[in-house]
Image (tube, rainbow, N blue to C red):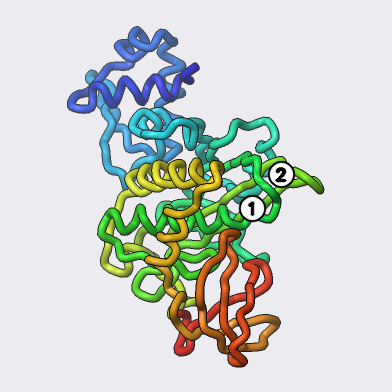
Amino acid sequence: MKNTKDLIMEALLKNSDKYISGESLSDEIGVSRASVWKGINSLKKEGYVIESKSGSGYKLIKSEEERGFSTYEFIHNLNTKYLAQSIIFFQTIDSTNTHANKIAEKSEEGTVVLANEQTNGKGRTGKKWISDENVGVYFSMILKPEIPLSKASFLTQIAGASLCLALNKNDIPAKIKWPNDIIVDGKKISGILTEMNAEIDRINFIVVGIGINLYKTSFDELPNIATSIENEGYKIGREKLLKDFFEIFEKLYSKFKKNSIVETRKTLRDYSAVLGKEIYLINNGEKEKVFAENIDENGNLIVRDQMGIIRTIFSGEISIRGLNGYI
């Protein structure tokens, strides 16, 4: 059932070329004038630019970079069967992953928690993901695959492949830095954090969180590592990127659940920033030079060390750097 805000948004979108009075909104969606007023103010607080004009009513000023997020409008235009068919949007939240973990048990598979700002965004190995308002995309997907625990880490690779494909579809030359980063022009624009709730023999749920630096901002502490899509001279709207990502991810994830990972592994190889290169493995401050050979069926990195020995590197235990910089 649609809530008052979504009904108001639907009416504003339908009448986007003109003003619509509070009385007309009240009659059209079947709520009181007071409810219309509260709904309009709530939408404004979420970041929507809604012009109010005495004697004329309300008009939505559609500018994607300025407005908030309409779950109704987005889902209406989304071509997925279940992924992101339920979206919980926050203007500000501590962490989308934290909230997704809290609600996962009672949520349907494919539910997405999305925020315009995170005050305590989570990164890999306990690091913080800087998530300022109006400059990025921060979201977490709740997934409930019936797969062996050993295959859970491959979901990070599916997310990376999907995001890389979505960006390249929009002429943004993204690559994948194993295990969980997306880079553009040699700098990080996105990170992926996968968390699992499981028992000895079964997975209860998995939360895949993604942060994307979209618009211009400064990265004073990490000038040679982090950047944004806009900083590198490219541009894409938040909703367009999300739409493309969710549609691609659902396709690859659905194939994965049927034991088909051919397309995902091909993407991982084709867009890899590390395969076929000498790289450093960094573990507890110790550097080791290796050659990145492949990614196995569980999403682990296969490398050849200086002795010629082939080894499997698990994503949770190590960091990677290029020989002359970040990658």
Pick the quarter of the image with the C terminus.
bottom left
Residue 174 makes an appearance in the image: yes
Instruction: Kindly identify the residue that appears in the image at 63 percent across and 73 percent down.
Output: 313
In screen coordinates, is 74 left or right of 321? Answer: left
Instruction: Kindly identify the residue that appears in the image at 44 percent across and 63 percent down.
Output: 268
Instruction: Kindly identify the residue that appears in the image at 38 percent across and 66 percent down.
Output: 270
Residue 151 quadrant: bottom right
The Cα–Cα distance between marks 1 and 2, rounded to whole angstroms, is 9 Å
Task: Inspect the image, locate mark 1, and give the three-letter code of the amino acid beneath it.
Answer: Ala
The residue labelled by disc 2 is: 203
Residue 64 quadrant: top left
Between 152 and 141, the one lying in front of the other is 152
Residue 199 quadrant: top right
> What element does badge 2 sit on?
strand
> What element does badge 1 sit on?
loop
Instruction: Kindly identify the residue that appears in the image at 59 percent across and 41 percent down.
Output: 142
Q: Is the Cβ of the residue at disc 1 closer than 8 Å to that at disc 2?
A: yes
The residue labelled by disc 1 is: 152
Between 24 and 3, the one lying in front of the other is 3
Q: Is residue 90 above or below residue 189?
A: above
